[in-house]
């Protein structure tokens, strides 16, 4: 079973995403802010995917992306946001994100993306 | 479902209901106790008839009139009751609180295994939908909430199925500086996918924290429940107590009374010590608009009184409190033999532990009158009949609420939940007659608060 770390400050969104992924065969870890996410990355060393909201209450999501990349884990990182510019997207991809998903997230589309990796 | 179409807004679509997401797993996999099922199948006429056998002074016709009542504001309610005993050995249920955004669906086993959405569907199809269909306002449908996502996503997806249209699920927190819901000219609007404001014709409303700060009276958007139900007692313990007193005065000739602990309202911070003495050094202090066990202090010692007194001091100039007689853990010599109460408690387990528990009824208005929708109990953390361990306080003995306020929101200590299933109901020692009494008490409380709301708001 593949592990997915969800980093999202909207607790309901986080829970809904988690349940969606559980129902489709993924194990999930939930973090409501960047600090929790970093703690999990330090403790769990086989995170296959990370779904990270760009706007987090304590730090921007790109700092979590950076932290994961620096940790040496081979996690596939998918960034999420409702607001993005082409420049921002390019920057995130250059920094190691595999994909940028614009909110709202369609569950079917998300699952197709995860299956495609 | 479209997740996160705006900050704290999700679009729930028909077909999104997933039973495993809207019940506690231990409840989803349980069977309703046959005795509870038997009770739920009694008609209101049967219940009224039985109640008059148990209370011979009651006027049965008047009681049936109350059970058949159609609330104007308070169409969906919850009550918390306690099973108490006096020193004469007379036991009864008394009401502790009435709630205008009650939780309960996730704790109620399915009554009909073929009805997958259970009580969610009953509430939406029999109470919400008929009201919406008669309401002449335009716009979309929404579910507003600030707690309890497990049930509120369930309600939103049931509404989506029932109306066959998408429902905006919106978190409406009191401390959100840029909320995704607003009332303009008393009509509700919620943020859409492109940051536009979507008008809402009807909304399911589960907003519990100071809801009157952001929801107006006379809402043009149909709300279940409207804020008037909260202000008249559904979320204000002082007003509820007043509503019960008015009911009791008006219904004394019919033998009908809302039983409650001895209650004092409008008590100032300065006067709290007088009540501590008057009630013989034990009492309950409640912040009138407190919720989910927050702002409730059980006092059994000088130390606990001082702690509460100090915690309440910062609001001393602006707040008044509700003070109630404490329901004792065990029989105490010298208490009023008729009106001094102690907990009956749960049936002792094999370690001889008996716990204080409450009884929660969720009710709704239907074409058949007020009907029970869900019922469950919650027990306190520590047993009544054992010495308190070091460091524990009386809340551990008396507090039954499962809500736990955490840094990132609310969680639930569901290990103390007692669902009314085959496995658990028996440990409460309740029978059909207690359920009948609980239902009647709940109907009277709902009626009293709705009448109080009508008298308060329709005269202005």
Image (cartoon, helix red, strand yellow):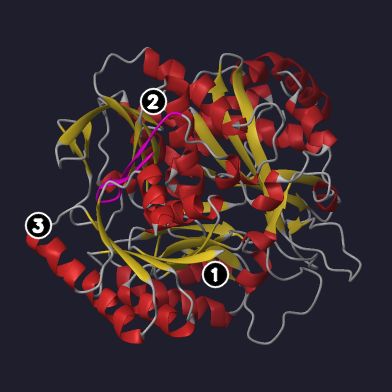
Query: Which residue is disc 3 drawn over?
Result: A85
B360 lies left or right of B100: right
Kindly state the secondary structure of the residue where label 1 is placed: helix
Query: Which residue is disc 2 drawn over?
Result: B454
Q: What residue appears at the point 15 percent right and 61 percent down from the top-left corner?
A: A89
Kindly state the secondary structure of the residue where label 2 is placed: helix
Query: Which residue is disc 1 drawn over?
Result: B276
- Tell me the chain of label 1: B
Q: Main secondary structure of the magenta part?
A: strand
**Residue B396 placement: quadrant:** bottom right
Q: From this viewpoint, which residue is outermost toward the front?
A: A116
A38 lies left or right of B220: right
Q: Is residue B128 above or below residue B377?
A: above
Q: Is residue B158 above or below residue B335?
A: above
| Closer to us: B423 or A79 | A79
Residue A70 appears at what percent x and percent y?
Answer: 30, 85
A44 lies left or right of B117: left
Q: Is residue A54 above or below residue B120?
A: below
Residue B57 appears at what percent x and percent y?
Answer: 76, 25
Q: What residue appears at the point 34 percent right and 58 percent down from the top-left corner?
A: A10
Callout 1 and callout 3 share a chain: no
Residue B4 magenta: yes
Disc with the residue nearer the chain's start (2 vs 1): 1
């Amino acid at each position: 079973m593949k592990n997915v770390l969800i980093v999202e400050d909207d607790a309901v969104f986080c829970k809904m995403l988690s349940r969606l992924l559980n129902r489709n065969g993924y194990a999930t870890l939930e973090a409501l802010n960047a600090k929790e996410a970093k703690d999990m990355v330090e403790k769990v060393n086989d995170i296959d995917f990370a779904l990270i909201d760009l706007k987090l209450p304590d730090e921007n999501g790109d700092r979590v992306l950076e932290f994961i990349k620096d940790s040496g884990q081979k996690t596939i990182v998918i960034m999420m946001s409702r607001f993005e510019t082409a420049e921002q997207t390019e920057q995130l991809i250059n920094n190691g994100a595999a994909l940028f998903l614009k909110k709202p997230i369609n569950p079917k589309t998300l699952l197709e993306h995860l299956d495609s990796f | 479902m479209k997740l996160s179409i705006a900050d704290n807004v999700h679009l729930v679509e028909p077909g999104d209901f997933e039973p495993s997401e809207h019940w506690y797993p231990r409840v989803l996999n349980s069977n309703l106790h046959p005795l509870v099922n038997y009770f739920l199948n009694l008609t209101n006429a049967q219940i009224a008839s039985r109640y008059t056998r148990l209370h011979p002074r009651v006027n049965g016709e008047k009681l049936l009139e109350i059970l058949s009542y159609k609330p104007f504001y308070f169409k969906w309610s919850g009550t918390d009751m306690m099973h108490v005993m006096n020193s004469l050995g007379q036991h009864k249920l008394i009401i502790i609180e009435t709630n205008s955004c009650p939780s309960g669906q996730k704790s109620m086993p399915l009554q009909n295994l073929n009805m997958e959405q259970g009580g969610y569907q009953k509430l939406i199809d029999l109470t919400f939908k008929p009201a919406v269909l008669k309401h002449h306002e335009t716009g979309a449908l929404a579910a507003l909430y600030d707690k309890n996502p497990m049930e509120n996503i369930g309600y939103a997806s049931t509404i989506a199925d029932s109306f066959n249209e998408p429902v905006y699920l919106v978190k409406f927190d009191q401390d959100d500086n840029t909320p995704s819901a607003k009332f303009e000219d008393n009509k509700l609007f919620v943020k859409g996918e492109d940051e536009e404001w979507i008008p809402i014709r009807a909304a399911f409303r589960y907003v519990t924290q100071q809801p009157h700060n952001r929801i107006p009276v006379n809402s043009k958007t149909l709300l279940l429940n409207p804020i008037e139900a909260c202000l008249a007692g559904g979320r204000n313990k002082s007003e509820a107590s007043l509503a019960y007193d008015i009911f009791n005065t008006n219904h004394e000739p019919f033998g009908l009374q809302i039983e409650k602990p001895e209650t004092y309202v409008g008590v100032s911070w300065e006067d709290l010590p007088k009540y501590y003495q008057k009630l013989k050094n034990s009492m309950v202090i409640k912040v009138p608009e407190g919720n989910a066990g927050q702002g409730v202090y059980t006092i059994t010692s000088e130390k606990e009184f001082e702690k509460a007194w100090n915690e309440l001091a910062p609001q001393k100039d602006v707040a008044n409190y509700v003070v109630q007689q404490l329901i004792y853990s065990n029989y105490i010599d010298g208490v009023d033999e008729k009106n001094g109460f102690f907990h009956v408690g749960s049936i002792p387990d094999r370690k001889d532990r008996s716990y204080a528990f409450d009884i929660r009824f969720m009710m709704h208005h239907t074409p058949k009158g007020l009907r029970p929708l869900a019922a469950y109990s919650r027990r306190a953390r520590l047993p009544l009949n054992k010495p308190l361990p070091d460091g524990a306080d009386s809340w551990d003995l008396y507090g039954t609420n499962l809500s736990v306020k955490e840094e990132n929101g609310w969680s639930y200590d569901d290990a103390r939940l007692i669902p009314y299933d085959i496995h658990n109901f028996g440990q409460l020692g309740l029978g059909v007659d207690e359920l009948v009494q609980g239902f009647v008490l709940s109907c009277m409380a709902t009626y009293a608060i709705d009448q109080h709301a009508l008298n308060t708001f329709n005269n202005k």
